[in-house]
Image: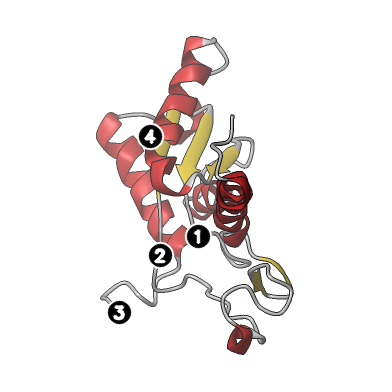
Amino acid sequence: MGALKEMAAYDLGALVLNEVVKRAGVDPVQVDEVILGQSYQSGEYVNIARMSLLKAGWPDSIPGITLDRRCCTGLDVICFAAMMIQSGNADIIVAGGVESMSTTEFYIPGDIKWGIGGRKGMPRGHGDLSIWGIPFYDRIQRARVMSQPEERYGILPS
């Protein structure tokens, strides 16, 4: 996959965190919060912000928050950090994003032979409803429900 495929995401995050404070001339003790965005958290990488700051050797008194908004996570992390500073809840926040597509878990349901929805009509993964499937499936179902009056009665929904 790539030169960094064997490197854990939190190891890479730790390197970046230490380089950021070094370049900014800030002691990690002064950091009020670490906020990182990561879209594909897995069992090994939950709360990548906290794991990265601890791996970097920063004080364990610094909280770490991980946000996941898929396509807009990077912008949300910056906005979240700005709001904390504007509200007076923090002075120095390290905010950014991290992803490791080489280590992303991807589950394929056992009943895939029945199609994407499986036998029960709902995308499934790892024994439970898949995180990515629910909003997508919900939109499809809403579109079907909204189009039924048109198809059945030839009228537009109000």
Instruction: Estimate the x, y position of residue 151 in percent, counting from the top left.
Output: 56, 52
Q: CA distance from mark 2 to mark 3?
A: 10 Å
Q: Which residue is mark 4?
A: 75
Q: Identify which amino acid the numbered label 3 is placed on.
A: Met
> Based on the displayed image, in which of its 4 quarters is residue 1 positioned?
bottom left
User: Circle 3 sits in a helix, a strand or a loop, which is it?
Assistant: loop
Identify the residue at image location x=50%, y=44%. Answer: 69
Query: Of marks 3 and 1, which one's residue comes earlier in the chain?
Result: 3
Q: Which residue is mark 2?
A: 100
Q: Which residue is mark 1?
A: 40
Q: Nearer the viewer, mark 2 or mark 4?
A: 4
Q: Mark 1 Cα within 10 Å, few/some/many (few <14, many 20+)?
A: some
Residue 6 sits above or below residue 8 on the image = below
On screen, residue 96 versus residue 46, left or right, reads left
Q: Nearer the viewer, mark 2 or mark 1?
A: 1
- Would you say the residues marked 4 and 1 are in contact, meaning their CB atoms lie under 8 Å apart? no
Q: Nearer the viewer, residue 95 or 117?
A: 117
Q: Identify which amino acid the numbered label 4 is placed on.
A: Leu
